[in-house]
Image: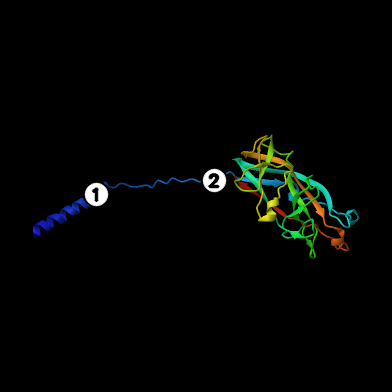
Amino acid sequence: MITVIKKTTCALAIFGITSGTAIAESIDVKVIGTIKPPACTPSLAGGGTLDYGTINPNTLSDDAFTLLEEKQVEFSITCDAAAKVAIVSSTGRALSAVAQDGSLADVALSHFKIFGSTVTPSYGLGLTGTKGIGGYGLRLDPKSVTADSTSVDLIQNDYQNLGWVIAPTGSLVSTQATVGGLKRNSTWAKTGTLTPISFTTMSGKFGVQAYINKKSELDLTKPIQLDGLATLELVYL
């Protein structure tokens, strides 16, 4: 029994030495990478400021809203590769948009012709005391837009996954924001179609049209600063 045990031990020792001399240097192989969507950057001329300058109170109505002219600046989106994106807007001045009945809301419905439409949703211009200064609509002028130097149609979707429609005025503010906070997706399609397209460069005119509350609702014994603020966000489709 003792002899058998010694042989077994010796055999194991030799095996261990033989295996050690057979193992070579090793190296790990890694397979890596990044799946990254194209990066798109929006740009507004003038740093995104649309200035109505000094407004003479004598040009404002005593007992009705006063609609100001539309202001437009150049707008563009540049992507580092072809991408499908939509624009979504939101207000930075909650509960300051003046509705037709004088009430305040995040998004108000005005019944005069902002961008030529009788019903256009608007964001607020801030407050003076407890009174709303007025409101304004936002749009991308649909007649001005090109994608990769080709004229395209502006299409919109207020309800996710329920279909795109042509945007006649290009308003970026959704009427549905007044009944549940839904946001409007605005993107582009080949002329005559309703399917979003990929592009690397989009350009066009970005417009704002403001209205001022009734003079009877405002304290005009001191300057009133229009204080509209909105955010434009790109959403990848």
State left or right for residue 80 relative to residue 26: right
Instruction: Please tell me which residue lies in front, 198 or 25.
Output: 198
Residue 117 x %, y %: 78, 45
**Residue beneath the point at 81% across and 53% down:** 211
Q: Nearer the viewer, mark 1 or mark 2?
A: 2
Q: Quadrant of residue 80?
A: top right
Q: How is the image coloured?
A: rainbow
**Element marked by disc 1:** helix
Query: Which residue is under mark 2?
Result: 36
Residue 153: image quadrant is: top right
Q: Residue at x 76, y 60 (%)?
A: 104
Q: Position of residue 18 (x, y in %)?
A: 22, 49
Q: Nearer the viewer, residue 40 or 136?
A: 136
Is 15 above or below relative to 215? Answer: above
Choose the circle earlier in sequence order: 1 or 2.
1
- Identify the residue position indicated by label 1 in the image: 19
Q: Secondary structure at mark 2?
A: loop
Q: Looking at the image, is 3 positioned above or below residue 141?
A: below
- Amino acid under disc 2: Lys
Q: Amino acid at mark 1?
A: Ser
How packed is label 2: few (under 14 Cα within 10 Å), some, or many (20 or more)? few
- The residue drawn where x is 12% and y is 57% is 6
Q: CA distance from mark 1 to mark 2?
A: 46 Å
- Left or right, residue 37 beside residue 213: left
Q: Residue furthest right?
A: 58
Residue 54: x and y, percent?
86, 54
- Is residue 65 toward the left or the right of residue 89 in the image? right
Which numbered marker is on residue 57?
none
Q: Nearer the viewer, residue 59 or 98?
A: 98
